[in-house]
Image: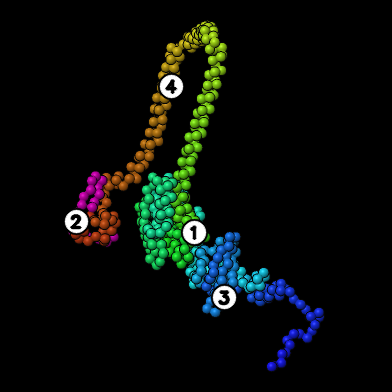
């Protein structure tokens, strides 16, 4: 037989360092958290289960190995998709050890469907671009109408969203006119159909519009992240409610819409909530009115009971007698006041008559007429003197002007000539030639002539 060789340490147990299981486990945990720390890990979900406390436990596996994983409720509720077994995912978390079982695991902080990274990057890029253009500005949000008569809906005709919307509207607002535009809400052809639906209902003139679908993965909801859909919602004049996915789902349509609803059912509730609050307010006002009228009636009844026991109702003839006596007193007071007024007026008339007699308007008129005649005589004399003095100054000036006038020279036998058609004054016969036309001005009148011969003065 082969000889057995002992592998026990030669150091006696009393002198060796002995570790407990907890110490080893804690040491391994520290090494994992220090040396590996937080990492991204890809794998397939297996054995997905959610505890009553809301924490999810599962296994990440590939073709060779598997890794235990846990995601606690707070992180799980922030995921934008529903994890399930068989789904390829990428998780981020801390590699650690669950000390009670001594098993290593990854504690997840985030989880994404595998292959969604490119879509997420495109989502963030387009969101940043549209936000910079101001499409998400809260000041552009339009208020929902209080009593919408026509409600437009753009969604799939076969999905649960339209059934939920119709169910809520039928129950809460049966008189509303619902205009439904069927459109695909998933796939490459979905975005153009959603845009067409928004434009058609906006042109139709609906009062409010619901655009949306049920929940799903980022890839399923991607049509509502398309730039064309976002710009169509922004350009619409109709208030639009975005009802895409569940509470954890967000799309760019949610940011640009006038209002976001967590679900299509919630969108329908938002459309009719103003109507419901109006009905409730009407009921409250009706009840308040009934109460107010009742209080007024009760107060009136109390006053009537009090008045019935008063002096007016017990002895009405006494009230009439007192009023009659008061009327007599007032009549006498009025008569005295009228007599005083008439006397005062008569006294004023007498004083005015005396003043008129003293002023004597006839004498005043006669004196004014005499003064006017005197003024007229003085005016005539002054005018004639002024005219004579002006004529005396003017006559020498006229004589001097006549002496200087060229017409006076012409009257002594001279004439002035102008060459035609230039109409230039002729100062030298040398400027003329035979057959030139000239105009001659005499002391009395003028004549036009043609030159036959030009003779120059030899001096």
Mark sitting earlier along the chain (1/3): 3
Element type at mark 2: strand
Residue drawn at x 58%, y 62% is 51
Q: Which residue is mark 1?
A: 246
Please, what is the dominant secondary structure of the magenta stretch? loop
- Which one is in front, 21 or 397? 21
Q: Which residue is mark 3?
A: 66
Q: CA distance from mark 1 to mark 3?
A: 32 Å
Q: CA distance from mark 4 to mark 2?
A: 68 Å
Mark sitting earlier along the chain (4/1): 1
Residue 202 picture location, percent across and down: 38, 54
Residue drawn at x 40%, y 36% is 393
Mark sitting earlier along the chain (4/2): 4
- Left or right, residue 288 beside residue 395: right
Element type at mark 4: helix
The quadrant in which the C terminus is found is bottom left
Q: Which residue is mark 4?
A: 375
* Above/below status of 54 relative to 97: above
Q: Is residue 343 visible?
A: no
**Residue 89 on the magenta segment:** no
- Say how many tags the image has: 4
Q: Nearer the viewer, mark 1 or mark 3?
A: 3
- Which one is in front, 140 or 36? 36
Q: Which residue is mark 2?
A: 450
Mark sitting earlier along the chain (2/3): 3
Mark sitting earlier along the chain (3/4): 3
């Amino acid at each position: 037989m082969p000889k057995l060789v002992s592998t026990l340490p030669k150091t006696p147990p009393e002198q060796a360092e002995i570790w407990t299981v907890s110490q080893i486990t804690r040491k391994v945990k520290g090494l994992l958290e220090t040396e590996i720390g937080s990492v991204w890990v890809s794998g397939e979900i297996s054995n997905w289960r959610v505890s009553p406390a809301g924490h999810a436990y599962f296994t990440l596996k590939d073709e060779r190995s598997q890794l235990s994983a846990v995601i606690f409720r707070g992180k799980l509720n922030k995921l934008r998709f529903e994890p399930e077994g068989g789904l390829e995912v990428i998780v981020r978390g801390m590699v650690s050890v669950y000390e009670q079982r001594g098993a290593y695991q990854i504690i997840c902080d985030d989880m994404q469907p595998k292959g969604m990274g490119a879509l997420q990057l495109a989502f963030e890029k387009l969101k940043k671009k549209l936000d910079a253009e101001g499409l998400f500005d809260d000041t552009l949000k339009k208020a929902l109408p209080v009593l919408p008569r026509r409600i437009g809906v753009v969604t799939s005709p076969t999905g649960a969203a339209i059934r939920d919307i119709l169910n809520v509207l039928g129950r809460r607002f049966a008189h509303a006119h619902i205009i439904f535009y069927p459109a695909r809400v998933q796939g490459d052809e979905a975005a153009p159909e959603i845009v067409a639906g928004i434009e058609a209902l906006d042109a139709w003139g609906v009062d409010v519009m619901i655009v949306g679908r049920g929940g799903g993965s980022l890839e399923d909801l991607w049509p509502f992240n398309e730039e064309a859909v976002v710009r169509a919602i922004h350009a619409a004049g109709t208030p639009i409610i975005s009802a895409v996915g569940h509470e954890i789902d967000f799309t760019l349509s949610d940011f640009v819409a006038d209002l976001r609803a967590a679900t299509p059912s919630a969108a329908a509730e938002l459309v009719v909530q103003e109507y419901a609050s109006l009905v409730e307010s009407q009921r409250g006002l009706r009840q308040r009115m009934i109460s107010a009228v009742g209080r007024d009636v009760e107060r009136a009844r109390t006053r009537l009971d009090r008045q019935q026991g008063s002096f007016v109702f017990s002895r009405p003839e006494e009230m009439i007698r007192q009023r009659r006596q008061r009327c007599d007193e007032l009549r006498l007071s009025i008569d005295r006041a009228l007599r005083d007024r008439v006397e005062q007026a008569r006294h004023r008339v007498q004083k005015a008559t005396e003043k008129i007699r003293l002023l004597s308007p006839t004498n005043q008129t006669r004196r004014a007429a005499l003064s006017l005649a005197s003024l007229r005589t003085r005016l005539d004399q002054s005018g004639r003197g002024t005219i004579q003095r002006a004529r005396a100054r003017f006559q020498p000036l006229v004589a001097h002007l006549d002496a200087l006038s060229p017409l006076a020279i012409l009257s002594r036998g001279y004439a002035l000539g102008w060459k035609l058609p230039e109409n230039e004054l002729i100062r030298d016969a040398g400027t003329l030639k035979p057959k030139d036309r000239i105009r001659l001005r005499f002391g009395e009148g003028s004549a036009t002539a043609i030159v036959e011969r030009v003779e120059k003065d030899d001096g």
